[in-house]
Image (tube, rainbow, N blue to C red):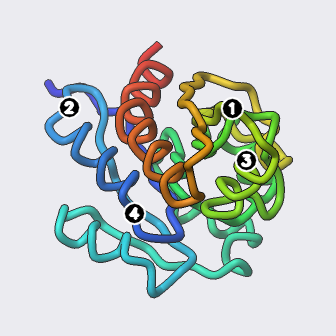
Amino acid sequence: METKKISLAIFASGSGTNAENIVNYFAGHDSVVISKILTNNSDAYVLERARSLNVPTSIFSGRDLRDPSFLKELENIDFIILAGFLLLLPEYLIREFPEKIINIHPALLPKFGGKGMYGHHVHQAVIDSGEKESGITIHLVNEEYDKGKHLFKAKCEVEASDSADTLAAKIHKLEQLHFPRVIEEYILQ
């Protein structure tokens, strides 16, 4: 008899490169399955990626997310992975999935976190501040943006010649390298 796999739902708002990387990492995994990809952006390229990867999708609004009936979308889901998802999760969802929502942030928290600190905005803020290093923080989600328990950090050097775009490319490499592995280690512990 086959044991039930740990079921993950990925929330994404944009291109979906991290979502695609996670799906590919867990393809054929003995213990973990990506059950669906959800987005609040009907134009997000993550929907195309999900289609090509044969992962079911769901599109929802901010209003849908704030309504506790949204939990129907997450039946049989064990963990939620935020991969470039920009909305603050409502408290009912965090209570329903205690320490089971994992996010990645494109900076070394607690610096450069909080509302409005995503994507290009984060990288530009790091450069403007004169920081010598940046990186990623993989963390659990609580009721506040970027304030949950840290699971993992990886660093890269910020060079004087870096722009927000070149720094973003360095950060993206760290995300691709570490995010799926850290998810796996955390959920299988």
Q: CA distance from mark 1 to mark 2?
A: 38 Å
Q: Which numbered disc flags the more N-terminal residue, 3 or 2?
A: 2
Near mark 2 (Cα within 10 A), the count class, few <14, some 14-19 or many ≥20, is: few
For label 2, the SS is: loop
Name the residue carrying label 4: 16
> Where's the N terminus, which quadrant?
top left
Residue at image position (50%, 63%) is 12
Residue contact between numbered discs 3 and 4, judged by CB atoms under 8 Å? no
- The answer to whether 82 is drawn above or below residue 47 in the figure is above
The residue lying toward the viewer, choosing from 160 and 182, is: 160
Query: Looking at the picture, which amino acid does disc 3 mark?
Result: Val
Residue contact between numbered discs 1 and 3, judged by CB atoms under 8 Å? no
Q: Is residue 17 left or right of residue 165?
A: left
Counting labels gives: 4
Q: CA distance from mark 4 to mark 1?
A: 28 Å
Name the residue carrying label 2: 29
Query: Looking at the picture, which amino acid does disc 1 mark?
Result: Lys
Q: Position of residue 111 (x, y in %)?
A: 81, 38
Q: Position of residue 25 (x, y in %)?
A: 25, 38
Q: Is residue 65 left or right of residue 10?
A: right
Of circles 4 and 1, which is in front?
A: 1
Of circles 3 and 2, which is in front?
A: 3
